[in-house]
Amino acid sequence: MSKKSQHQRVLRIKNMVCPRCIMVVREELEKLGLHVLEVELGTAVVAESDDVDETAIKAAITSKGFELLHDKLEELVESIKVAVINLIYSDEISSLTTNLSTYLAEKLGKDYSTISTAFKACEGVALNRYIVLQKVERVKELLTYDELPLSAIATKLGYKSLQHLSRQFKEVAGTTLNRYKNEGGADRHPIDNLC
């Protein structure tokens, strides 16, 4: 028995940053009657259908804080964000054998200067700065959980030393690691709004 080839449509979606986002996007697309084949951070794959109403998809996605992308530059920048967030929230960053610029270039299949230039043009902030902001936000989360010592947090996020983490944290957060930890982490920010 041969399988009939199914036409697919890939939707590029901005602001998907966590597993909950994947669940919400899937639910919204299914509510529209779409056959959802796959949902990952930044993309959803649906079976192509003549009934697909672009306006309805856009409205459903937008109502939940996401954005349907059409521009190649925006798609690249969203791919960069997803790659950075996935790396920082995985254990892979602590065992990275290359620098972040090389990692991103390999992950996205583009040279780093193209990636960096596109990111700065679209977001108005340097990619290196965005990475630092994401790492500091992850440190804040880990400090709030209070499950790991500071040295383990530094190692987990790929810092060469606790001193490097401390300097970067103070520069971004305006306070020390210990003070932030003792004050209970009051100023955390959503990771999709860190530019």
Image (spheres, grey):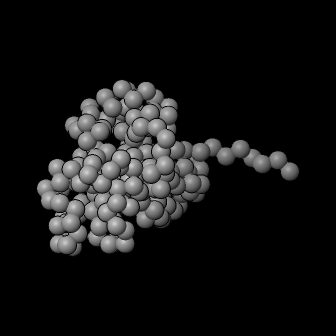
Position of residue 155 measured from the top left corner of the image (x, y, whole percent): 39, 55
| Of 124 and 36, the residue lying toward us | 124
The quarter holding residue 136 reads bottom left
Is residue 194 something that shows in the picture? no
Name, please, the residue furthest toward the right: 1
Position of 194 relative to 129 (above/below): below
Residue that appears at 33% across and 32% down:
116
Residue that appears at 71% across and 44% down:
5
| Of 182 and 74, the residue lying toward us | 182
The quarter holding residue 142 reads bottom left
Is residue 115 something that shows in the picture? yes
Name, please, the residue furthest toward the left: 174
Position of residue 40 measured from the top left corner of the image (x, y, whole percent): 50, 53
Position of residue 29 measured from the top left corner of the image (x, y, whole percent): 48, 59
- Position of 34 with respect to 166 (left or right) is right
Position of residue 85 measured from the top left corner of the image (x, y, whole percent): 39, 51
Position of 183 relative to 26 (above/below): below
Residue that appears at 25% across and 42% down:
129
Number of numbered discs: 0
| Of 195 and 71, the residue lying toward us | 195
- Position of 195 with respect to 22 (left or right) is left
| Of 16 and 186, the residue lying toward us | 186
Residue that appears at 23% across and 69% down:
181
- Position of 11 with respect to 129 (left or right) is right
